[in-house]
């Protein structure tokens, strides 16, 4: 029997013994019942738990699948409904500028089209307060409420997105609803994170990271990729183009900041990295999806929205709209996308309100000239020389930037 298997024991103590008494499998009768129950439980959990649907998004064989659960799809569908549009305006109507007293931005609209848009602004931004949210009901021409002054800038901003940023928003475009969804403060707005340097006490300097970061998927990646990359033109590219150390002078720290931004972008769009990249060569444009080029334009668009609109508007906002550190609200990818890779699931909200994609009216606001529109060019894969990458920002200073 030495070295062979042996059956041992009575009805409650059967064991397989292997070799000279070495225990391999030890199950008594009652333990076996527990094991059976545990297996049945596990099976029930596995059957009850939904497996995510995997949707092939790029070329086959490149593992560019995106994963979705029915719950997630249902919540995205619910969030992306568009309110019923107002009835079309009577085309035979005098111009708004002839009828009203203080029209500075919508001066290319007829009075009826103007009023129709006012109804829509209420639905999009302040459905409960209605006109009173922006107006003194006794004097609609008055600019006494800051909300009206902000809304006027937002009208210009929305029109600029729809006309100058077609490289990102295509013909689909945006309305106030894309961001606001019936709320004065849209979801997905953001503020500079408090400067975390020194907050680890005796443990030392956190250097703006090493704390759970909701913007970076709960990871401990740098806390404020948004102030760093979504306001000014800081360089996002860090990867070398050669296998061995060469002329790539970027540090691991810079890579961490880039990854933090990438986590934020992925979360905002409800996708994973392979929506835009081939994960075997994250830097290579010729192996990336077309969506990466759209995202490239999106980054530039968001920088302009923040630097030309949201940041200059900061003095208009009351204290309760600022962060504890006094920073003003800003726009990010999530402000429009809200977890879907095309806002409003790709339906164009502009179809019913083409006036928001109309020709930009000349700015006439006293003291508030419209921002000069910038021309952007897509530099693609050629833009990878060290010179073209530009100099990297000083991370801690940018992280605390107000
Ligand atoms: C989200 C803010 C907002 C809401 C809500 C809003 N308005 Fe306005 N309203 C504006 C802005 C901004 C202007 C100025 C537009 C411009 O300068 O071109 C304006 C201008 C007007 C004017 C022109 C007044 C004048 O004589 O210059 C009228 C009339 C008007 N709104 C009516 C309404 C009515 C009626 C409602 C409700 C159905 C409404 N508005 C809801 C922001 C709003
Ligand atoms: C790209 C996204 C975006 C679009 C499009 C947009 N907004 Fe905004 N809006 C914001 C953000 C971000 C804020 C700041 C919210 C905060 O206080 O945190 C804001 C604030 C406002 C406020 C001030 C609300 C308050 O209670 O302080 C008004 C009014 C407003 N928007 C009106 C409009 C109108 C009208 C339009 C369409 C013409 C529009 N917005 C389009 C992003 C957007
Ligand atoms: C929505 C599209 C999109 C998603 C999703 C995305 N990226 Fe990116 N990624 C970009 C774009 C665009 C750039 C270049 C940005 C620029 O140059 O302004 C970039 C740049 C990078 C770079 C720098 C490449 C270089 O040349 O040095 C790395 C690394 C990277 N991404 C990693 C990731 C990772 C990891 C994920 C997932 C967590 C991810 N990305 C998700 C669009 C995306
Ligand atoms: C002002 C609203 C707005 C903001 C802010 C915004 N986007 Fe978009 N984005 C859109 C719209 C609208 C579309 C749909 C365009 C279309 O129909 O082709 C879109 C499309 C995209 C697509 C293409 C999706 C596809 O399937 O083709 C990507 C990728 C994308 N956005 C990434 C980003 C990233 C990354 C950011 C932040 C840096 C961002 N967007 C910020 C409005 C926005």
Image (cartoon, rainbow, N blue to C red):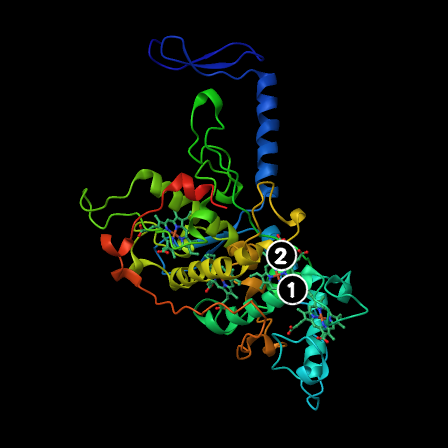
Give whichever of 277, 111 is nearer the camera. 111
Figure check: 117 above or below 168: below
Check mark 2 vs ligand 2: CB closer than 8 Å? yes or no. Answer: no
Query: Residue at (44%, 39%) from the top-left corner?
Result: 222
Mark 2, secondary structure of its residue: helix
Quadrant of the drawing holding the N terminus: top left
Query: Callout 1: few (<14), some (14-19), or many (20+) C-alpha neighbours within 10 Å?
Result: some
Percent x, y of residue 340: 54, 58
Q: Does the numbered disc 1 mark a residue whose Cβ is under 8 Å from ligand 1?
A: yes
Q: Is residue 84 visible?
A: no
Q: Are marks 1 and 2 in contact (CB under 8 Å)?
A: yes
**Where is residue 91, by image quadrant?**
bottom right
Residue bearing the label numbered 1: 149
Q: Position of residue 291 (x, y in %)?
A: 41, 62
Residue 152: image x %, image y %?
Answer: 62, 68
Q: Residues within 10 Å of mark 2 (few under 14, many from 20)?
A: some
Q: Can the viewer see residue 161?
A: yes
Q: Under tag 1, what secondary structure?
A: helix
Distance Cα–Cα, label 1 vs label 2:
8 Å
Quadrant of the rendered image containing residue 323: top right
Residue located farthest toward the bottom when viewing the structure as drawn: 92
Between 146 and 341, the one nearer to me in the picture? 146
Residue 290 image point, x, y percent: 38, 64
Side (left or right) of 59 relative to 45: left
Which residue is disc 2 drawn over? 316
Q: How many marks?
A: 2
Q: Which mark is residue 306?
A: none
Residue 88 as seen in the image, left or right of residue 280: right
- Residue under the image location 47 percent in, 51 percent down: 266
């Amino acid at each position: 029997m030495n070295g062979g298997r042996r059956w041992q024991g009575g009805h409650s103590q059967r064991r397989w013994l292997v070799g000279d008494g070495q225990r391999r499998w030890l199950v008594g009768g009652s333990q076996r019942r527990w094991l059976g129950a545990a297996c049945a439980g596990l099976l029930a959990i596995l059957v009850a738990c939904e497996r995510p649907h995997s949707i092939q998004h790029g070329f086959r064989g490149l593992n560019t699948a995106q994963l979705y659960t029915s719950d997630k799809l249902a919540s995205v569908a619910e969030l992306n409904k568009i309110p019923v549009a107002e009835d079309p305006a009577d085309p035979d109507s005098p111009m708004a500028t002839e009828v009203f007293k203080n029209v500075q931005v919508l001066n290319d609209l007829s009075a009826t089209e103007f009023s129709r848009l006012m109804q829509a602004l209420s639905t999009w931004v302040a459905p409960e307060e209605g006109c009173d949210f922006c107006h003194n009901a006794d004097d609609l021409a008055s600019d006494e409420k800051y909300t009206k002054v902000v809304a006027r800038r937002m009208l210009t901003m929305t029109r600029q997105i729809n006309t100058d940023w077609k490289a990102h928003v295509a013909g689909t475009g945006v309305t106030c609803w894309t961001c606001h969804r019936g709320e004065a403060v849209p979801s997905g707005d953001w503020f500079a994170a408090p400067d975390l340097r020194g907050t680890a006490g005796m443990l030392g300097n956190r250097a703006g990271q090493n704390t759970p970061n909701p913007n970076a998927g709960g990871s401990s990646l740098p806390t404020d990729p948004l102030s760093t990359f979504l306001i000014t033109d800081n360089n996002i590219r860090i990867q070398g183009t050669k296998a061995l150390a060469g002329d790539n002078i970027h540090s691991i720290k810079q890579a961490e900041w880039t990854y933090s931004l990438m986590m934020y972008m992925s979360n905002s769009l409800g996708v994973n990295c392979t929506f835009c990249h081939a994960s075997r060569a994250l830097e290579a444009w010729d192996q990336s999806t077309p969506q990466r080029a759209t995202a490239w334009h999106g980054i530039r668009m968001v920088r302009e929205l923040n630097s030309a609109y949201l940041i200059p508007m900061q003095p208009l906002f009351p204290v309760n709209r600022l962060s504890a550190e006094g920073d003003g609200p800003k726009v990010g990818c999530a402000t429009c996308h809200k977890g879907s890779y095309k806002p409003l699931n790709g339906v164009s909200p502009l179809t019913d309100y083409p006036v928001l994609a109309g020709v930009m009216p000349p700015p006439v606001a006293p003291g508030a000239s419209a921002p000069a529109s910038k021309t952007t060019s897509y530099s693609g894969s050629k833009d990878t020389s060290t010179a073209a990458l530009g100099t990297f920002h000083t991370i801690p200073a940018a992280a605390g930037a107000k």
